[in-house]
Amino acid sequence: MAEEKKKRDGFGSKLGIIAAAAGSAIGLGNIYRFPCEVGNNGGAAFLLVYLAVVIFLGIPVMLSELVIGRRSQSNSVGAFKKLAPKTAWPIVGYMGVLCGFLIFAFYSTVSGWTLEYIVKSVTNSFQGKDLATIEKEFTAFHDMGWRNVMWQGIFIFLTGFVVFKGVKNGIEKYAKILMPLLLVILIALGIRSITLPGAKEGLAFLFKPDFSKITGKVLISALGQGFFSLSLGMGVLITYGSYVKKSDNLTSTAFSVVIADTVIALLAGLVIFPAAFSFGVKPEAGMGLVFNTLPMLFNQMAGGFWFCLIFFVLLAIAALTSTISLLEVLVAYLSEELHLKRQWATVVACAGTMLLGAFASLSLMSDTPFAIGGRPVFDLMDFISSNILLPVGGVLIVIFLGWYFGKQKFFAEVTNEGTIKAPLKKVIFFIIRYLAPVAIAIVFISGLIK
């Protein structure tokens, strides 16, 4: 067993852990979903509730997954097999693998769109076009099913290229490059956006709260965005936690990842809201904001060509850091539970995702045959993973840690067997045991009702 552990790949540095875990959390959800949620839920009022959610619930739940992963030194299925042998708990791990597979399949569809829009930006395809024309072209692009599948395949290949190289030489190495690059691009875009005429209105909307707008709906939306954004409940952080050294501080890692994720979301707001208010456009929910409204805005501003190109490069990088983590969940399972070599596990996982993902891409065509009950396969995969598997997985994970794994083992893991201080461990464990299950259950029920 000791020899097996020595051979197991892992992160080589604290920076690598934070970059990779933050890359998992930071994705398209931060760049387009967060601004949409802010725009539809009272602006700064939503932001305040969201910050409370990620601090008081996001960190404890993230720490739960990291603890389970490092304690077991195994993938999301193997973790529960080791920590709860001869019980039904490994089902939670299988749910995580299934959830990661489904999300990667439809997420890679959207990720492929970023490559299409990079090409459109390079060729200056948005020049002189109004919003209606850009929307028609977006619909026409959906109807070119083969083109969607082509870009999806290229994105899956790029993801597989990184994961194929392993944890330290692949995921960690590229996370250290991609995450700083993403931050630099966002800062540059944010500076450009806040210097636009009329940008002050957008800044006020984002940072000047109207407390009367804090409602039950805002709370539910903030909870949902927090768990979606932080990649909780899908086995990613259990898998990444298993690669963390026993000497690293898990609590500070969880805090660092949540801070990085929140900073990126705020920077995305600084890019989008000042620009939108400057041109009299209010953010709309869904993909239309990113792939229709923003290209139209870029088209109207000085230096818009470069602004547009850099933005879609940013989107592609954000998407890639997330798809890398989703693929790693599958690869870790295949290599450790089914004993495939890592390289073959990567190939099999990519091929399986490409097959399922193609159905997701083709289901978005106007006359698609790939719909069930009138709903595109893409929407069904999104609903099953986001509204069922993620929240149910999240609830079961905190119940497992709070009630089965127990307080003493949790304290031992977060204090590195008593060698470091963890002054908040009692508060965090209380949240994990009592508050987190209720909060996630609320998200689950509200998601089903919607």
Image (cartoon, helix red, strand yellow):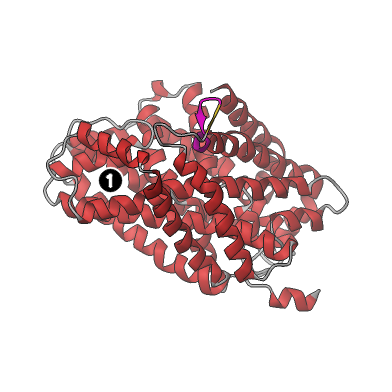
Image-based side of 265 in relation to 124, left or right: right
Image-based side of 97 in relation to 276, left or right: right
User: In x, y percent, where is residue 416?
Assistant: 70, 64
* Pick the front one: 135 or 99: 135
Identify the residue at horizontal 52%, vertical 28% (top origin): 220
Helix, strand, or loop for circle 1? Answer: helix
User: In x, y percent, where is residue 280?
Assistant: 19, 30
Magenta residues (range) = 373-379
Identify the residue at horizontal 51%, vertical 28% (top origin): 375
Does the rendering let one see residue 263? no
Q: Please give the count of numbered marks on the rendered protein.
A: 1
Report if residue 132 lies within the magenta region. no
* Pick the front one: 157 or 13: 157
Asked which quadrant contains residue 145, the reply is top left
Q: Which residue is mark 1?
A: 271
Identify the residue at horizontal 66%, vertical 52% (top origin): 65
Three-letter code for the amino acid on which mark 1 is drawn:
Val
Asked which quadrant contains residue 126, the reply is top left
User: In x, y percent, where is residue 61?
Assistant: 63, 45
User: In x, y percent, where is residue 374?
Assistant: 51, 25
Report if residue 378 lies within the magenta region. yes
